[in-house]
Amino acid sequence: MSIQLHTQAKLNDPIPGALGLAWQIGELQVDFRRRGILLTYAPERGELTVGDHSEEAFSIRYENAFSAIGSILKEDDRTIAGISIQDRRDYILVLPDSKRRKLEDLRGAVIGVPYAQETFDELWRAAAMHDLESALYGAGIARNDVSLKDLGTDTGKAADRGAVTRRVMEALLRGEADAVLVSGISGFALQNWLGARPLEGFHRGADQWEGFLSAAKVQVLTIPAGLSAEQQAAADRVLAHAIAASQWAIGHRAEANRLIAREMGIPETAVEVAYSANLHAQLDLEPTTEKLEALEQYKQFLFSRRFLARNAGVKDALDAQRFHAARLLIESGQIELPGMEPVSPYALADVPRSFFTDRPPAHILSGDKEALEAAKSYAAWIKDGESDRDRYRQLPFEQLKQLAASGLLGLMVPKAYGGPGISVFTLTEIFKIISAADGSLGQIPQNHHFFVKTVELVGTEEQKAFFFSEVLKGAQFGNALAERGLKSYNEMSTRLKSDGKGGYRLSGTKYYATGALYSHWIPVSALDESNKRITAMVPRHAEGVTVIDDWSGVGQRTTASGSVILRDVEVPQAHILPHWKIFEPPQIFAAFGQIMHAAIDVGIAQAALADAAWFVREKTRPPLKSGLERASDDPDQIRRFGELGIRLHAAEALLEKAARLIDEAEQELNAESAGRATLAVDSAKYFATEVAIEVTNALFEVAGSASMDQKYNLDRHWRNVRIHTLHDPARLKLHHTGSWFLNGIYHEYKI
C-alpha cells in the first residue's frame, strides 16, 4: 500500500508562540521599519534576527525546553527573557470501524508508538509512554496486557517528519496496530483524513500539565547575553510586541487561531484540535516562579537521562529586567497594541514598481474649461466604489493612475511651461467636485499642487523646466511635512547637511505624509545647516527612503497618510528649493494651501447633504400619526434642510470669494492684496469647518436611526470631515479674523 500525504504537518510540530503571533500581526515589523532596523524571521526555527547580519545583529529564539536548556548550559551565552507552558493534545486513535471505544478495550491490543530517531523525539516518546502507562494503570490494564510497537521510519531527519505521520497511517490501515499513540498535528491529521476516533478516557493536554515529562509543554524565549544598551532596547521592543500579541490573543481567539494556523502552515481548524483550547492564555511569556520551577524540573530530568553534560541552575540564566522593561514600553504607550484591522501590506512592503511605471501618457489640459469638464468626468468615475474603498480600506491605485492620465495633476503648471495654468477659483471648484465624489481622493492631490506652487515661486528656471515637465508627464508629488510632537518648524528634526562633495544628505522621520505612498516624488520639509526651512525633492525610490502605510485614522482612510523614513538620503543641489524665501515678501502661498483644504470640506458636506436628502426621500418613515405619506413632506424636515442648505451655500460663497481674491492678489501682489486674500481664506476655512461638521452630523438627525446601519456607511462623511478639519484647528482662524475686524490688522503666515 502506498499513501500520499500532501501536508506540511510534522509529528513534533513547534508549539505556536507569542513571538510568531506578533510577527503575523505585523505591528512588530512596522515598528522596526520606522526605526530603520531590519528584522528577519525563520518560523521553522522560531528565530528572529534583529539587524542586517552584521556584528551588531543578534537573534531572539522561541524554542522548546530541550533546545533552550542546551543553548543556556552548553553555549553559556544566552539568557531567558520569557517562558510559556503550553499543552499539545495527545490521543490514542483507532480506525472509525474499530470495536474499541474506551481505554478498557485496549487489553490485548497492539499500540503503535511513532518514533523518529532524534533526541527530542526520544524525549517525547519517553513522556508519551509515561502518560500512556499512567492512563492504562488508571483503566485497570497492566503494562504486559498490551503490546507496544515502534513505528519508526527509514529516516530520522527532522525535515521529513511527515514520513513519521505517513508511517502511523500505514500501520493503522494495514492492521499492524490496533491503535496508535499520537500528538498534536499528527493527531489532527489522522482524525481529519482517516476519520480516526480518539478513545474515551485518554485525552491528554487539555490544561493538564502535571507531568513535567511532556517535553513540548515548556517553551522558552532566549536572547544573547551581554547585549549592548542599543541591542537591549531593540530586544525589549521585540519582547513587548510578543507580550502585546499574547494579551490580544485572549480577546481575539478566532483571529489568533487564523494567524497561528497561517504561520504554522496548518488548517485553522487544526489549532484547537492539536493544541489546548486554552492555548491563547498559555501564550503568556511572563517568567513566573512556577514556570521557572517547571523548567528546572525538566532540566533535572534531562540530566538524569544523561542528555546534559553538566547540571547548572537555569534560574541563574533569567534576565528579569528584559521582561520588566518590555512591560514598561507597553504601559507607557510606546508600543502600539494590535489594532482592529490587519496591518496594511504596504506597511510591511513597498508598492509594486509597476504602479509607477505602467501608465498611459498624461493628457495636457488646455485651460479652466477643459479642466472642469475633466474633473466632472473623473468624479463620476470614482464615485462608484467610493463607499467600499472606505469601508474595506481599499487603496485607490487605479483611481490615482487615472487622475494622472486625465491631466488633473498638471492643473497648476503655468502656461509658460506648457501647462493649463488654471485659476485658483477653478482649482477650488475642482477640489469640491472630486471631494464630493470621494473625500479621501479629494485630499490626496492637495499637497501635490502645494508643491507645484512651491516650484513656481522659488524654483530656478532649470528646476521649473524639470519638475513641471515631470508633472505634465503624470508624475505625482507627495509630501513629508509633519513630524510627531512638533511645536514649530524651527524644532524640526529632519536635517539637510552637506556631504562635503557638493551634494547633501537628508535624514529624518515624517508622519501624516498624505499621498507619499502613491507618489513619484516626495517633497520633504527640512532645516538646512543655517536653520532655514528648505524643501528637498526626493525621488520616491531613492536609496534610504522608506514609505510606510501605517495610517490608522478613523477617516480619510485611503489617503495613506502614514510615515516617511529618510536615512542618509543623497540630495543634489538641483533638487533643493529654498522654501523660506516664499515668506520674505508679501505672499498668498499659505492661503493657497489652506483654500484647498476648505474646498475638500465643502465638497464632503455637499455629498453628505445630498445623501441625507436621498435617504429622507427614499428610506425615512414619516412621523407616527402625522398623516404624511413621505418623510420628505414633513415641515420640520423641510425647515432643517433649509437651514443646512443656506449655511452650505454661505460656505460655498465664502470659498468662492476667497478664491477670487487669491487670483486678484496674484495679479498685483502687495501687503494689502495678500492680507485681503488671507483674511478671506481664514474666514472661509473657519466657516467651512463648522458647516461641514454640522451637515455631516445632521445627516443622521434628519435621516433617522435606520441611516446608522453599517450597510449604508454614511458615517464616512462625518469621519472624513472630522479628521480632516483637525489638521489646522478652525478656532485659530477666529483670532486671525478677529484681529482684522477689531484692530484692522491682517494676519501674516510666517515660518
Image (cartoon, grey):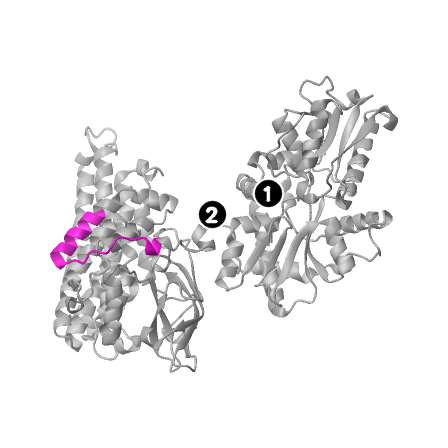
| Res 511 → quadrant | bottom left
Q: Choose between 321 and 177: the one closer to the eye.
A: 177
Q: What's the amino acid at mark 2?
A: Pro
Q: Choose between 180 and 449: the one closer to the eye.
A: 180
- Label 1: state its secondary structure: helix
Q: Relative to residue 463, is residue 45 depicted above or below?
A: above
- Label 2: state its secondary structure: loop
| Few, some or many residues within 10 Å of mark 2 (<14, 14–19, 20+) | few
Where residue 536 sits in the image (x, y, percent)? 35, 71
Where residue 575 sits in the image (x, y, percent)? 33, 73
In the picture of the structure, the residue carrying the numbered disc 2 is: 342
Nearer to us: label 1 or label 2: 1
Residues drawn in magenta: 355-379
Q: Tell whether label 2 touches label 1 (CB within 8 Å).
A: no
In the picture of the structure, the residue carrying the numbered disc 1 is: 264
Q: Choose between 404 and 487: the one closer to the eye.
A: 404
Q: What's the amino acid at mark 1?
A: Met
